[in-house]
Amino acid sequence: MKVEMNLDNDSNNLVQAPTNGDSEKLSPSNLSSLLGSKDRDYLLCSTAAAAETDQVKISDLGGKVIGIYFSANWYPPCRNFNRVLIGVYEQLKSNGSNFEIVFVSSDEDLDAFNSYRENMPWLSIPFSDLETKKALNRKYDVESIPCLVILQPDNTKDDDTYYDGVELIYRYGVDAFPFTKEKLDELRREEKRKHDSQTVTNLLTNPERDYLLDQTITRKVPVDSLKGKTVGLYLSAQWCMPCVEFTPKLISIYQKIKQALQEKGGGEDFEIVFVSNDRDQSSFESYFGTMPWLALPFRDPTARTLAKYFDVQWIPCLIIIGPDGKTVTKQGRNLINLYQENAYPFTDAKVELLEKEMEEAAKSLPRSEYHAGHRHLLTLVSEGSGGGPFICCDCNEQGSGWAYQCLECGYEVHPRCIRAVTPQSSIEDRVIFIIQICTCSN
């Protein structure tokens, strides 16, 4: 899974397609104009479909809700979403839903296209039809992939076409169908009702289970024991390298927070619950065995419910629940990276205080530094002077606010990651680093 994600949970942020003149009803002739060409009036069937022909007439799609799916085999976020979309598509088809998907490839060559399409149960525009693919990308202003554009069969209103099918599938799954404004409004109302009545108990329990597992994996800890605590829901997996890299840092921060709260007294407490995305029981047990906190049982259905409820698209992800059972932030991982244990209790008020402290501390930082491992001079920048959200080139974690930035090549590091050197020693460090790489490769 992709490791960085936009965790914006604004349930009203449904992006509608721009108006291109008057909207037209998706009649068979209009579909043919949209998805076909003067030399082609068909789409390719799924390679797994058992049929006498590998083609479907575009006119056969009349009256269906259509998802135009822009994707590519070479991009991991596309492959990750593809698995989710296949599950939703197959469930909708098995229920007899009037839904079809048309794949628009951004693959690099025909072999990659065919390899990617092998697992797709839906239709595709031929790889060779570059003009139709370009026209669709232009029409729907596709700037990033994966992208799923939803078209209604009676597309006569400007708000009948949605760009954000990927978000809708991740957030609502099959429940989003038929993707109408009325259905999405209903889902948003239900989502708001759930968030308003949210408690740690209804988040982490189900009719068959009211407990979590401790490190022994056999002892059961009541979910109700978390009431009144700040709780982090940690969605992670052993197969995910960024997760494996972040987990030791989170363990260290967790232990420091626990120790500080114990020394402070007063009954305040912090706990983390591991929500596994591991692929098998042994991987779950091995990975959880490194963690000092609690966990949902492996493959508990609540794990999938939580991912959908919080619109989690990528891992690792750390969601913070306050003592009152309400969501504090879904940016727990970023806050840990930025402020370490000082991020606790992760509230807006605490983050605002930390940002002010960072601004004050930046006044005493050198305006420029040479950093070990980089040959150019780095300049201190803020969001107001050319900076902004970035991935630190030293620790590979997200940063925001102040950074040391190379104005020549865009290299950026956290101020805390700076290892100041003289210009000459910076060059020497790079030479040693290159020699070590060459030695290892040989």
Image (cartoon, helix red, strand yellow):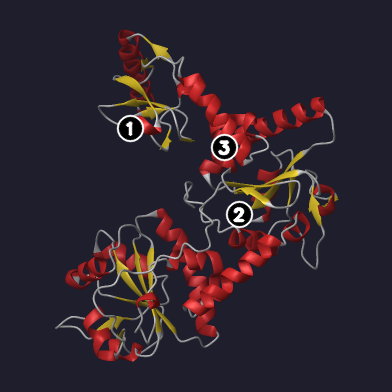
Q: Picture coordinates of residue 203 (x, y %)?
A: 72, 59
Disc 2: which residue:
277
Spatial CA distance of label 2 from label 3 is: 22 Å
Disc 3: which residue:
335
Left or right side of 9 for 213? right
Question: Which quarter of the figure has residue 333?
Answer: top right
Q: Is residue 374 visible?
A: no
Q: Is residue 12 visible?
A: yes
| Image mark for residue 156 | none
Disc 1: which residue:
386
Q: Residue at x 64, y 30 (%)?
A: 341
Q: Picture coordinates of residue 437 (x, y %)?
A: 36, 25
Q: Picture coordinates of residue 105 (x, y %)?
A: 29, 66
**Kind of residue at disc 2:** Asn
Nearest to viewer (mark 2 / mark 3):
3
Quadrant where the image shows the C terminus: top left
**Kind of residue at disc 1:** Gly
Sort mark 1 into few (<14), some (14-19) or many (20+) by Cα contacts within 10 Å: few
**Kind of residue at disc 3:** Leu
Q: Residue at x 54, y 70 (%)?
A: 173
Which comes sooner in the sequence, label 3 or label 1?
3
Figure label count: 3
